[in-house]
Image (tube, helix red, strand yellow):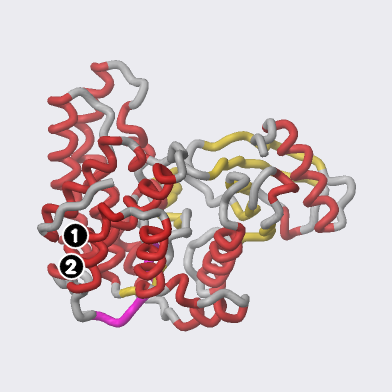
Amino acid sequence: MHPLHDSEVARRLLDHLARTFGCADAVYLAGPARIQGGFDTTIFGFTLDRVPAALAGPLILRLSGANADPQRVKLETIVQNTLADMGYAAPRVMVTESDPAILGGPFMVMQRVPGKTLGHAIEGFGAGSSFPERVRLLFSLPAILTGIIDQWVEMQIRLHQLPAEPLLRAVTSAGIDARVITFEGQLARLRTIAERCALTGLEPGLAWLDHHRPAPSQAAAICHGDFHPLNILANHGSPTGVIDWPNVVIAEPAMDVGSAIANISTVPIGLPGPLRFAAQAAIGAALRRYERAYRARRPLDDKAVRYYQVYRAVAQLVPVGAARAAGRAGGGAFHSATGAGNLIALIKRFSGVSVRL
């Protein structure tokens, strides 16, 4: 199925919402207009008029590809709405559809959280900018990162302080096996995918994870799994919400911290050599400040943080390998040779084992 033109998505979306909510005279006040973000989803912002209160105000359409797992949008809906019910700043979902015939792929319609991402000033790190602009951005990078660390840590700790049981109950009540959001279940899923796609080059990494898992030093918590400044929104200097929940997992908080460090430290940086090295140094220093800021408020086990960095790197490599095995080009940053190489290097650094794709 080919992706629909944006105008057709808009028409079909309005028709679907009008039928679902019984508001035949609904019209757009704004949009749908594409919003930057999402490697494997297309995101639109829009506002409706002549609709029930549930659809009032700015909204987001998060449209997955035709081949996306329909259970993913169902799970994300449960996660976001459960967290919203618990008072956490996750956007509430009003509509979830798994039938790709409606808009060309499974989709969600949710509240639009006000503000911009905490990391909007460095998003893309100057991609498309002139060389002088990139140099200016590089020199401002330490101050930008330092300025957002406290908000980043505050939102993460708020999440980790929530009880995990209501989310596990909500997932089970929806007819979904709760193991999909446990660390044990996600580790088993990685192995299943690797075996099915014959990713033998990743076996040393998976075996290391099986044999070196640290004893939990803290009770399991709700972890986002990709908790970085581009997934935290803020308005006028105050955090307003956290987005992008497909990697949610119940695990000790060190998993969330280690995953954040691994994801950020290995993302390819599209800058010339000298600038790239300087940017990597600035990002490394910021990540060390982030980890210290978290430790100042909650204890972390060093061994666990390193373990979960390896886990996240392996978890990022598995879909890359699966896409290559299927002859598909992946859409994320780590599907590039540089991105995969960065992940492989991190695994070697912290585990001592060598993996390949």
Give the crowd class for mark 1: few <14, some 14-19, many >=20 residues within 10 Å. Answer: some
Residue indicated by mark 1: 291
Tag 2: amino acid: Arg
Q: Position of residue 61 (x, y in %)?
A: 63, 47
Quarter of the image where one finds residue 99? bottom right
- Pick the residue in front: 243 or 262: 262
Under mark 1, the amino acid is Glu
Is residue 274 highlighted in magenta?
Answer: no
Residue 350 left/right relative to 117: left
Residue at point 69%, 36% (across, down): 30
Q: Position of residue 65 (x, y in %)?
A: 59, 44
Q: Is residue 258 visible?
A: no
Stretch in magenta: 218-224
Identify whether 313 is placed above or below 221: above
Number of marks = 2
Label 2: state its secondary structure: helix
- Residue 21 in the figure: left or right of residue 155: right
| Foreground residue among 356 and 180 | 356
Q: Residue at x 15, y 61 (%)?
A: 292
Q: Residues within 10 Å of mark 2 (few under 14, many from 20)?
A: few
Residue at 64%, 52% in the rendered image: 106
Residue contact at pointers 1 and 2, CB within 8 angstroms: yes
**Image: 32 above or below 105:** above
- SS under mark 1: helix
**Which mark is drawn over residue 295?**
2
